[in-house]
Amino acid sequence: MRKLKILKRHALSPRALEELETWIGVLLALAAGALLYATLTAQAARAAEFPSDVGAPTLLFQSASGSFSAAAPLETDLRISVAGVVARVRVAQRFLNSGTSYVEAVYVLPLPDDAAVDRLSMKIGERIVEGEIHERQQAERIYGEARAAGQRASLVRQTSANLFTTAVANIAPGEHIDITIEYLQTARYDAGEFSLRVPMTLTPRYGAPDTPEGLAALSSAILPEAPPTIEGMAAGAPLRGLRSGPRSTPGHEAYVHAVLAPGMPLEWLGSRSHEVRSVRQQGPAWTASRGGGGSSAASAGVRVTAPPADLHVVDTVAPRVPMDRDFVIAWRPQVGVAPAIAALTETVGDTTYALLMILPPAAAHTGRSQPREQIFVIDSSGSMGGQSMVQAKAALKDGLGRLGSGDRFNVIDFDSSAASLYAAPQNFTSATYAQALRFVDGLVADGGTNIGAAIEMALAQPVTSRYLRQVIFLTDGAVGAETALFTAIEQRLGDARLFTIGIGSAPNSYFMRKAAQFGRGTYTHIGDIRDVSAKMTALFTKLERIALSDVVIDWREAVELYPHAIPDVYAGEPLVLAASFPAVPDQPLLTTAFGQAAGLPWRQTVGGVPSELPGIAALWARRKIEHLIDSRVAGVDEAVIRKLVIETALEHHLVSPYTSLVAVDKTPARSAAAALERRNIDNTMPAGAQWQAAFPQTATPGPLLRWLGAIALLAAASLLAAARAQPWRSAS
Amino acid sequence: MRRPWHGAMPIMLTLPVGLHRRPLRRQRRLRRLAVAALIALGVALLAAGFWLPAKAEVAQHLLNRAWQRTTVGDAAAKPWPWADTHPVVRLTLPGSDEPLTVLAGASGRNLAFAPTLLDGSAAPGSDGVTVIAGHRDTHFRSLASLALGDELTLERPDGSVLTYEVADLDVVDSTRAELRLDADESIVVLVTCWPFEAVTVGGSWRYVVTARQRF
């Protein structure tokens, strides 16, 4: 009997145990899985709650410290010096800490897309610290160390082609630090007029979607290497800080002062963006231009040598202007005085750098040589809302109205997706014209900016033989993932030409210009609705006339020329080339350019003139870097590009995607005990743009946690109940 | 008693856990451990799950004190010494006599304590869109019962009370929709997650309440 009992106990218990243990295993596994899931979702939620930490691609409203009210507006002092077509711009900004703790200020600085940034200086009280150029990671390390050690430091980094970030660490309470950045750029020439565009605000960009792949594509497109190490400037940084300020914050204001030595008598001088007044002066007395920035005079001053040409001093009528639109200064030489070809040179060491500008001859013929097929692509995304959309519609209608019988056309509208008026281009008739006008009138600005889909659709339109395909693209270019788009354009272009038209007060002109370059067309910017008709007329006249083609330059020396391939030249637009070659002492540059103008051979000879404003070398280096970075689209290895860019940038003291300027004041400002607060400085929204925000994450993991807790307790209870149901347990 | 068992195994649920070969005493200990662990886990999860709404509730009381200081002119009154935010306005939802103190900055940390005013959106009462975000399962749970025409009020630090009328209720996909901040009048937009009863977090749907100022 007893034996039986033992047997029974033993026969039962292993079975029961086995079952129980199996269930325990299952339950534990379930609980562990649920816990893991809860942790993961909670983390995902947290990541979504702090868009700044993941680099969300749209316009962000960060709330790092909630201290907007304390962030003093930035004071900006813009000094522009122009000699011929070379301009040096000095941007002095006063970072003021009106708070009560040490702060680090971060500001996104919009610069022209061809800017060669070569100088940084930091002024604290009367002391001036000059910036040094370093490889990017090294510069970031230097800055990070100085920042941790409580020293005042500043860092200028290129975050995308036309966006630079300035960071200033350890600004003491009540103190201000003046950061001065200088860059070189060239004036544009179009239809008899030179113009210089100094960006003061930036378009918030719509980037790749916020998937990991999208973000990766975005950051690799703009930041070509591992993210910077400085905390808070993590991957995806190009879009960081693109916030607009709260409405209550006064916008940033700038003082703008320009000195122009155009080197030729002018018919007109003014600004397309602001009300300005100009004063004409004689001789080089102006070099002692209004000071105020301390170190400014030496660098902003232009060394004027013989002959004492006319100088023009330009100021805005208002003493200070809000930084809500770009500053555009323009000048028109008197008819007939602009040379057909000009070469500015600068010799550094044993190398001579030259900037060669060819103005095409006035087109001899006006008749059309080839029937055209124009594909109009219009951006109706949310960022186009307001004035920009009105302008774009006006420009598009203007373009449609210029078509004639015998032309073919189509209209593509895009926001988050693309849609076309016709499946294939149609003949231009009064009926199709009316349909097109109705289509345009019905456009509403909303949704995202999916330029890729629009480009695909435009370039995939069925080709009509004998017709010259011209794609005319109207957008504010608020896009992020640029490289992919350029690759698409280059691959799908065929015989078509892509012309980009930038709309609004701050289009992404880097994208527009580059897209046009890859599309073998040109870029037009329309900043003011009053200019729509004039600019469209100019563009369409141009589209009918190629002024100069098959250009060949005869250089005597082995030359490194940018761009490598010389493009077609349209009437009214110059060809600008940058070259470098071994210097020949005491022998000025003499070159001859050959080409085809209106079907006839064309030839011009030019002698080089040393530039009054140093910087030709830097401008050449900037073009070289741009060329190197563009070669990524053609599949050149990243490591090779990086090495060459760093070499060039270090030699010419230039900020590039791989190099940064850093300045460190050796005297510590902050003791280790005092905390450093980070503060982002808002950019003022471009005039005419609409305000948008990202949605915050608005749920707690509370309900989920409660459910999981209840499940775990239930599991424990059922386990206990199962064990109690077996009396043998207590016996043993 | 450690005789290995060789009898035929009845039909039972078997999983490759390999525990049945363990000695009996160890098996009992394991079982007890498992029960204890499950209880501990369950209690911890429940505590965490109830702590979140409790924190949201308690914080409102602390915030009320900070609000009192705000109303007497301390524009950046910190609700607790290490806070980096401050009350900006008080929101009263219909059917509640207890106003919610709204903090500046829609960060996750701030949202745990109070509804928050989105940085960059218009100041309450000024032309433009004032965006206030809150958690669907705490402060903004009652948004689910809002109806068109309902009245909500904003109390500003200077004591003035603005009245808004609910003009639109909408569910949007936050990954596609845009939160527009431009307006020619004063508009209040309340944002919370949707659906209200959802258990998991991180979804892309938002419940958006639009209210226009009424004079």
Image (spheres, coloured by chain):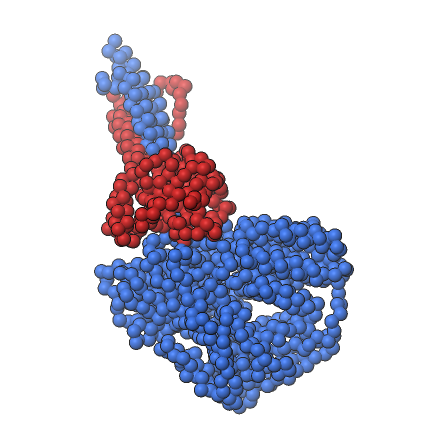
Q: Is residue A321 left or right of residue A633?
A: left
Q: Outermost residue toward the front? A: B215
Q: Nearer the viewer, residue A235 or A416?
A: A416
Q: Is residue A387 visible?
A: yes
> What is the drawing colour of chain A?
blue
Residue at 69 percent across and 60 percent down: it is A401
Residue at 43 percent across and 41 percent down: it is B165
Compared to A110, does B199 lie above or below?
above
> What is the drawing colour of chain B?
red
Q: Nearer the viewer, residue A312 or A594?
A: A312
Q: Is residue A539 visible?
A: no
Residue at 42 percent across and 37 percent down: it is B150
Q: Specify the quadrant that holds the N terminus of chain B.
A: top left
Q: Is residue B110 left or right of residue A555?
A: left
Compared to A556, does B73 lie above or below?
above
Measured as percent of width and height from the top left, residue A230 is found at 36, 60
Measured as percent of width and height from the top left, residue A402 is found at 70, 62
Residue at 44 percent across and 68 percent down: it is A321
Q: Is residue A194 left or right of residue A706?
A: right
Q: Outermost residue toward the top? A: A1
